[in-house]
Image: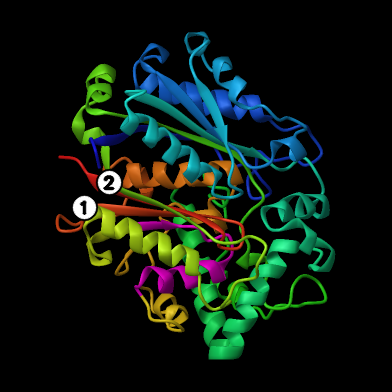
């Protein structure tokens, strides 16, 4: 790192969808401007005013389809009139749009064009029927494949990965790991007031997760419980330099320091070389751990992109916590639970907090910021003194764009 870079003042709106009592599919729900403004204004309040912001970045995948709205950078001045005429840019990388937005802000700090960058990630998806939404989201992959793909395109893609895993290692073995991942996510979401599954009162989570998939109703190798939630929401943070930290008046112990970041890309036109491996995720994680100068054993927590439970299991293998084919057992044994060896997705992840696609990568960073600064409320985990690091892994498409970052506690 050419200079020190800090993350401060994280904020999440609620993740609105079918799991929330506020959600009503028959009524008009809040739109893009509402979420952008709510998230942005709360961060500005926490950094003591918009006058401290030099630049802004907004991450969004596909508002041009879900909301008939392109050109999102110009929404930033609607947050506060003091942002008018200041630079703002919108970035997109499918479901990794939020991670790319954070990384874009980091690069502005490193380049010296800004001391304080406001980053907002947003998506509003509950505007169309599920089948139309599936078609829009298929654009996160190579769209010509759409005509040959499953009606539920991305569930079909990750169902194929799950099918390969089951064929290689056993259906029952895999299902136990997927079900435990689901249970962990919902139990974590119940401790986070903004999570879509916060109000989930089911006492049969494991039984539900273990139900055999029915391809005649959905996809062949995944249940609905294996899928992330269609969500509306926004997350925001401020990225600051040492000068920016002084300018905003935020104490060091309320910040976390970025110590490594990496991005990896694969060819979107090609199918995964090995459906049993998240190879792009593995490349990004290896690079970010090398840049941070740490081993995975020094991580206190990980926020990974569990768009589907099988992606969570495969991530444990890609990061190196479990050997290839051993991820399902690693999860089933409780290692990734909030009281396990390495807590994953402590506010519910994409499965249970929700997946407003353009916001997800920012939400992951907010969660790490909350955990490492002790501001996660009921969802707070213990951060050991010898493990002061947290990592995010934000994936776009079928493991095609991956952004990974490592952060460290500041004391």
Q: Look at the image and tell me whether residue 222 can be seen.
A: no
Left or right: 178 in relation to 255: right
* Residue 348, numbered circle: none
Q: Is residue 356 above or below residue 52?
A: below
Image coordinates for residue 85, horizontal then vertical, percent: 52, 10
User: Measuring 49% from the left and 25% from the top, which residue is drawn there?
Assistant: 40
Examine the rendering and report whether any part of residue 75 can be seen: yes
Question: What is the distance, in whole Å, between disc 2 and disc 1 at their CAs?
Answer: 7 Å
Side of 209 where 407 appears, left or right: left
* Magenta-span inclusion, residue 319: yes
Tell me the residue at 39%/11% (across/down): 51
Which region is colored magenta? Answer: 302-321
Mark 1 Cα-neighbour bin, 10 Å: few <14, some 14–19, many ≥20: some
Other residues around mark 2 within 10 Å, as few (<14) / some (14–19) / many (≥20): many
Task: Name which of mark 2 and mark 1 comes first in the sequence.
Answer: 2
Q: Which image quarter is the C terminus in? A: top left
The answer to whether residue 363 is above or below residue 310 is above
Disc 2 + disc 1, Cβ < 8 Å: yes
Question: Within the magenta stretch, is there residue 97?
Answer: no
**Residue 52 sits above or below residue 159 on the image:** above
Mark 1: secondary structure: loop
Residue at the spot of label 2? 372
Residue 203: where, in percent of width, then height? 55, 67
Seen in the picture, residue 178 relative to 84 is either above or below; the reply is below
Judging from the image, the colouring scheme is: rainbow
The foreground one among 102 and 11 is: 102
**Label number found at residue 388:** 1
Instruction: Write down the quadrant of residue 330 in the picture.
Output: bottom left
In front of the other: 394 or 12:
394
């Amino acid at each position: 790192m050419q200079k020190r870079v800090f993350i401060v003042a994280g904020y999440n709106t609620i993740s609105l969808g079918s799991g929330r009592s506020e959600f009503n599919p028959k009524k008009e729900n809040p739109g893009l401007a509402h979420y952008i403004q709510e998230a942005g204004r709360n961060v500005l309040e926490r950094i003591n005013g918009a006058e401290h912001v030099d630049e802004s970045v907004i991450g969004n995948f596909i508002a041009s389809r879900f909301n008939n709205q392109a050109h999102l950078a110009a929404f930033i001045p609607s947050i506060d009139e003091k942002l008018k005429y200041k630079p703002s840019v919108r970035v997109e990388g499918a479901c990794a749009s939020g991670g790319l937005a954070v990384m874009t802000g980091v690069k502005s700090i490193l380049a010296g064009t800004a001391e304080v960058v406001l980053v907002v990630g947003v998506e509003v998806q509950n505007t169309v029927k599920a089948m139309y939404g599936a078609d829009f989201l298929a654009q996160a992959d190579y769209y010509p494949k759409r005509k040959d793909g499953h009606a539920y395109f991305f569930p079909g893609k990750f169902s194929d990965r799950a099918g390969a895993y089951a064929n290689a290692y056993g259906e029952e073995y895999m299902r136990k790991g997927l079900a435990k991942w689901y249970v962990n996510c919902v139990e974590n979401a119940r401790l986070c007031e903004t999570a879509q599954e916060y109000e989930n009162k089911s006492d049969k989570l494991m039984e539900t997760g273990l139900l055999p998939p029915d391809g005649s109703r959905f996809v062949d190798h995944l249940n609905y419980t294996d899928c992330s939630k269609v969500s509306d929401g926004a997350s925001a943070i401020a990225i600051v330099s040492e000068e920016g930290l002084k300018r905003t008046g935020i104490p060091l112990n309320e910040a976390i320091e970025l110590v490594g970041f990496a991005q990896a890309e694969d060819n979107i036109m090609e199918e995964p070389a090995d459906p049993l491996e998240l190879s792009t995720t593995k490349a990004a994680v290896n690079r970010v751990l090398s840049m941070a100068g740490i081993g995975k054993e020094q991580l206190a927590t990980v926020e990974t992109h569990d768009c589907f439970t099988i992606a969570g299991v495969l991530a444990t293998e890609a990061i190196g916590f479990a050997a290839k084919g051993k991820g399902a057992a690693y999860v089933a044994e409780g290692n990734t639970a909030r009281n396990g060896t390495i807590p994953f997705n402590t506010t519910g992840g994409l499965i249970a907090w929700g997946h407003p696609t353009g916001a997800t990568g920012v939400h992951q960073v907010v969660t790490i910021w909350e955990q490492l600064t002790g501001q996660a409320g009921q969802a707070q985990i213990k951060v050991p003194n010898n493990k002061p690091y947290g990592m995010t892994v934000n994936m776009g498409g079928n493991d095609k764009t991956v952004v990974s970052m490592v952060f460290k506690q500041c004391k």
